[in-house]
Image (cartoon, rainbow, N blue to C red):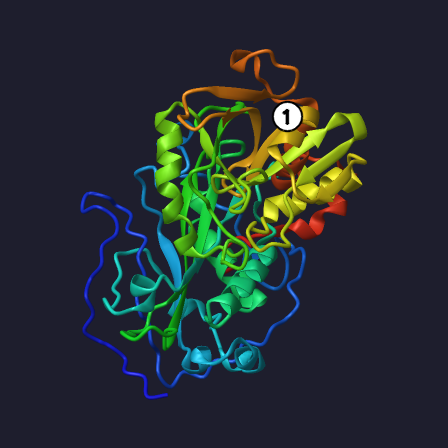
Amino acid sequence: CGILVVLSLVLVNVASASSPFSPLLFVNQRRGETRHNKNTKVQNAEKLRGGGESASPPPPPKENIDWDSFGFGLNGVSTDYMWVDTIDACSSSSSSDAQEEQEEEYYYSKNDELNLQPLKALQIHPAATVLNYGQALFEGCKAFRRNDGSLALFRPDRNAARMQLGAKRILLPPVPTDVFVHAAKRVVQANAQWVPPLNKGALYLRPLLMGTGAQLGVAPSPSSTFCIYASPVGNYFKGKGLRCLTLRAVTEYTRAAPGGAGGIKAAGNYAPAFLPQSIVKQEGYDEALFLDAVSHSYIEEAGASNFFCYMAHNATLVTPPLSEGTILPGVTRESIMILARDECNLVVQERPLSLQEVREYGTEAFCCGTGASIAPVGCIVTVDNEDETTTSMILFNRAKNRKQCKAGPMTTKLYHMLRDIQMGTASSELQERYSSWIQIIEPAPTTD
């Protein structure tokens, strides 16, 4: 394809010079390497020990770390390893149909020796399409230290599937599920000491898929980089436990529109939300509640989280639909829908949900996502007039004012059910039914 591999690269340092953690990317071209990674079925569970080699238990959490102080961020620490793999993407400039036919030509590698590397500041050419045209996707998944001492990822295969959908939308070579899950497991294994203690947080993995080849013209990148880095995190929203959030419905800004890219986890979807999120937080609210782009009447997402409303009068849980392509198909969202239907006997509906309906019939509401898990919503503030000086509140769970807001019983039940499955503290029957959601991380092998 006549690709010029740029060896003299310009260093791009996203993190500050004082930061010990620089989650950057680099072009890691390896010409002449034979790689053949066909899609294979991901096994749902792995034995913690077995085979012919002995395995040590996962290392304990790193000492002298104030895990309780961690929020959702880098938290001033630097983990040890990341995964980086770059391939040629010659045909990525072709149509999506042609790309799908040629998908098997893209060979991301499972080679640990090549791809598992020490975390460090990396390099990229300034003409890379990720920098110029935002050709990038990201994912988020968590590894937990469980009740039995094992380490586990929660449904990474679903993150892989979502990244594949996004890759087809922005013409990047999709990462096969088996490669994605393998890489995620290796990153957790290599950074095992950074998985917080039980109930103290999680190791958050940030998979990236980016156009990293130099391309001045407006076209897809000639090469693609798949990277995963990790950071230990605490709660997404400040405070412990099920603290109720106050959302501010935003009508002056729109997160996504029909026909756009709001339904994929494209990096460029998030920066435009910084301003409205900053405004509502300066006004004293926890997060912005984004509405539909056409009528500004229907709920879409709460910041970077999916939104649910529980209506007790008919035992129904409602969440905005994916059909318009403006709602991200969250992994936590999907998990909650399954648990609500199969374990709580709720009617689960994916359909348009107006602020007016929530005001009239909403009993409880909550946000959800990998970072946020399940976060109860205490109230939604709406602006009623053009000068934006008069507001009204939608209060949940029979609260009379914001100070009385607390998590409702259905929100609490779903939160603990999901968390117990993740932590291995659910009943044996529940754990068995959802064993496919848990990917146990093999301990590092040791020689006898």
- Is residue 189 toward the left or the right of residue 88 in the image? right
Q: Residues within 10 Å of mark 1 (few under 14, many from 20)?
A: some
Residue 339 lies, in percent from the top left, at 72, 40
- Is residue 388 toward the left or the right of residue 163 in the image? left
Amino acid under disc 1: Arg
Where is residue 279, by image quadrant? top left
Is 69 placed above or below 302 here? Answer: above
Image point (56%, 27%), residue name: 377
**Front-lying residue, 419 or 365:** 365
Where is residue 401, by image quadrant? top right
Residue 320 shows in the view: yes
**Front-lying residue, 31 or 297:** 297
Give the labeled residue for mark 1: 359
The outermost residue toward the bottom is: 2
Is 61 placed above or below 176 here? Answer: above
The outermost residue toward the front is: 386
